[in-house]
Every structure is written in structure tokens, then in C-alpha cells.
């Protein structure tokens, strides 16, 4: 586990490879994310973006290379996986809330089971984060009673209740109606401003310009280009990046 200039790597991927049968989904992925850094990952559909971040908390298993989260290597060891999952929050494209549980119960379940919080402590924490995502008044409703944007904010609050060191976002606005997107992005911008370490797969380039410390462009399972947002958007190095940006920014 290496460090640079006194900065701690919250996430380090070294030569990571992943195959589905004969299909190479990830090839030789090298990525380091420092504590407090915001990294936005973009690229065409099927480029390996979601697979890459799903490997970080073992939703997908990498078959080559090494992944470290806050100095702990992700291995087959179950205890190791559980430790890393406690430190990594994930927000999915589809909200993955438990439909039979109230919003409040969706948020308290993890802290009670995995962090050994009492019901009262978990409840207090749940309300704190529901207030943070501006949805506290919905605490006793069920997910089906909420809009998509509200459900996604509940999903963010649920991840925050575990007080993770690293937040992963997998296209969190792509399943939302356009008018719902801004509320979710607003919450994510605030998290970024508060110093949360974030890796976010998204096509929301306005959000990327606002919060990203670095942009990562992927294509065909590889990282093609990594650059600060200013340079990435104004002077991309590769033709593949230029083509992608010309297509996505013209919409």
C-alpha cells in the first residue's frame, strides 16, 4: 500500500482485471483515490465503469491485480470483505431500498446489525441523515410512496448512516425523471463540499465540472485518460475522449 506526499490513499487499484467468460470487462486498471478526493468516472455504455466500482466492495470479484481500501486489501477472506463493506457506501442506479420497510427502517437496519448501534442510536442517526438530504418528513412512509428522486435521496442517507470513509455512486441519476435530478445532485455536491471521498460514475457533466478533482475516462474496459476537469473538458489528450465529449456535450 503506497502513499504519496503524506497523502493517504483511500482507494488503490493496481493492475485490476475482470472477465465474464471470455469477455474482458476490465483490463489492467490502475487508479488511486486520496482521502477527501472526488473522482468522476465517465465513458460510453459498456465501457466497464460500473463493473470497476462494483469490484471495490466485492459486488463483482476481480480476477487479476490488487484492490486496497484504506490500506486493507480486498481478498477472498470474508472478514476482510465485511470490513471493507463497512467502510464503503454505495448508491446504485436503481435505489435498492427494501419495499416492505419504512424509510426509517431502511436506514436503521444496517447500523443495528453491522455496527451494533442500539435502536435509539440508529434512529437518531437515521433522522440526522434524512434531515441532511432534506427528506426527514418522509421517515415513516414506504419507498413506494415516494418519488424516484426522494427514493434516491433515501438511498444516499442509508449509505451515510454507516458513516463510510468512501462513497461510490453508480449512475445515481440515470433512472430519474429530469425534474428529479437536481435535488439528488444538490445532495451529492454538498457531500463533496463536506470532504467526503467519492468515486462517481455519471454522465452529469455539469456536476463533474463542479465537484471533480479528477476525471477518469473509460472505454472498452480500460482507463483511457485521467485529467483535472479543466484540462479534460477543454483539451482532452486522446481522440477517443474527444469523440465521447463531442457526443455527450452536444446533447
Image: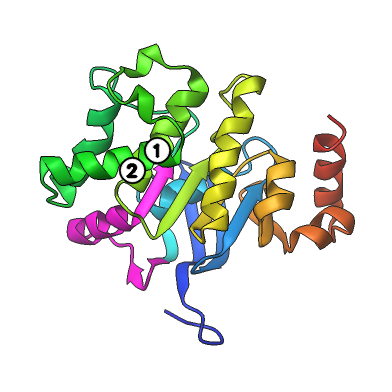
Pick whichever, 64 or 44, lies toward us: 44
**Residues at discs 1 and 2 in contact (Cβ within 8 Å):** yes
Badge 2 marks a residue whose secondary structure is helix
Residue denoted by label 1: 131
Q: Is residue 125 visible?
A: yes
Seen from this angle, which residue lies furthest top? 145
Q: Position of residue 248 (x, y in %)?
A: 80, 36
The label shown at residue 128 is 2
Pick whichever, 116 or 52, lies toward us: 116
Q: Residue at x 71, y 51 (%)?
A: 210
Q: Quadrant of the C terminus?
A: top right
- Name above or below for residue 195 compared with residue 178: below
Q: Which residues are magenta?
A: 68-90
Q: Position of residue 19 (x, y in %)?
A: 48, 47
Q: Residue 183 sits in which quadrant?
A: top right
Seen from this angle, which residue lies furthest bottom? 5
Q: Is residue 110 visible?
A: no
Q: Position of residue 171 (x, y in %)?
A: 56, 36
Badge 1 marks a residue whose secondary structure is helix
Q: Position of residue 49 (x, y in %)?
A: 58, 45
Total marks shown come to 2
Q: Residue at x 30, y 53 (%)?
A: 85
- Name above or below for residue 237 compared with residue 184: below
Q: Residue at x 23, y 42 (%)?
A: 124
Q: Residue 232 sits in which quadrant?
A: bottom right
Amino acid at each position: 500500500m503506497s502513499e504519496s506526499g503524506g497523502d493517504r490513499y483511500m482507494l488503490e487499484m493496481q493492475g485490476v482485471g475482470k472477465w465474464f467468460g471470455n469477455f474482458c470487462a476490465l483490463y489492467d486498471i490502475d487508479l488511486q483515490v486520496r482521502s477527501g478526493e472526488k473522482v468522476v468516472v465517465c465513458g460510453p455504455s459498456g465501457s466497464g465503469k460500473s463493473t470497476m466500482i462494483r469490484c471495490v466492495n466485492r459486488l463483482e470479484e476481480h480476477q487479476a491485480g490488487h484492490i486496497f481500501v484504506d490500506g486493507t486489501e480486498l481478498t477472498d477472506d470474508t472478514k476482510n470483505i465485511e470490513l471493507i463493506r463497512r467502510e464503503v457506501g454505495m448508491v446504485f442506479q436503481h435505489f435498492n431500498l427494501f419495499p416492505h420497510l419504512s424509510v426509517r427502517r431502511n436506514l436503521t437496519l444496517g447500523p443495528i446489525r453491522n455496527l451494533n448501534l442500539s435502536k435509539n442510536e440508529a434512529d437518531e442517526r437515521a433522522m440526522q441523515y434524512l434531515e441532511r438530504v432534506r427528506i426527514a418528513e418522509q421517515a415513516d412512509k414506504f419507498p413506494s410512496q415516494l418519488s424516484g428522486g426522494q427514493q434516491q435521496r433515501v438511498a444516499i442517507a442509508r449509505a451515510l448512516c454507516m458513516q463510510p470513509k468512501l462513497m461510490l455512486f453508480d449512475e445515481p441519476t440515470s433512472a430519474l425523471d429530469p425534474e428529479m435530478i437536481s435535488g439528488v445532485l444538490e445532495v451529492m455536491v454538498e457531500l463533496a463540499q463536506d470532504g467526503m471521498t467519492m468515486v462517481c460514475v455519471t454522465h452529469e457533466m455539469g456536476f463533474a465540472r463542479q465537484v471533480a478533482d479528477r476525471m477518469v475516462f473509460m472505454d472498452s474496459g480500460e482507463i483511457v485518460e485521467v485529467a483535472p476537469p479543466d484540462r479534460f473538458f477543454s483539451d482532452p489528450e486522446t481522440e477517443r475522449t474527444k469523440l465521447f465529449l463531442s457526443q455527450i456535450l452536444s446533447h
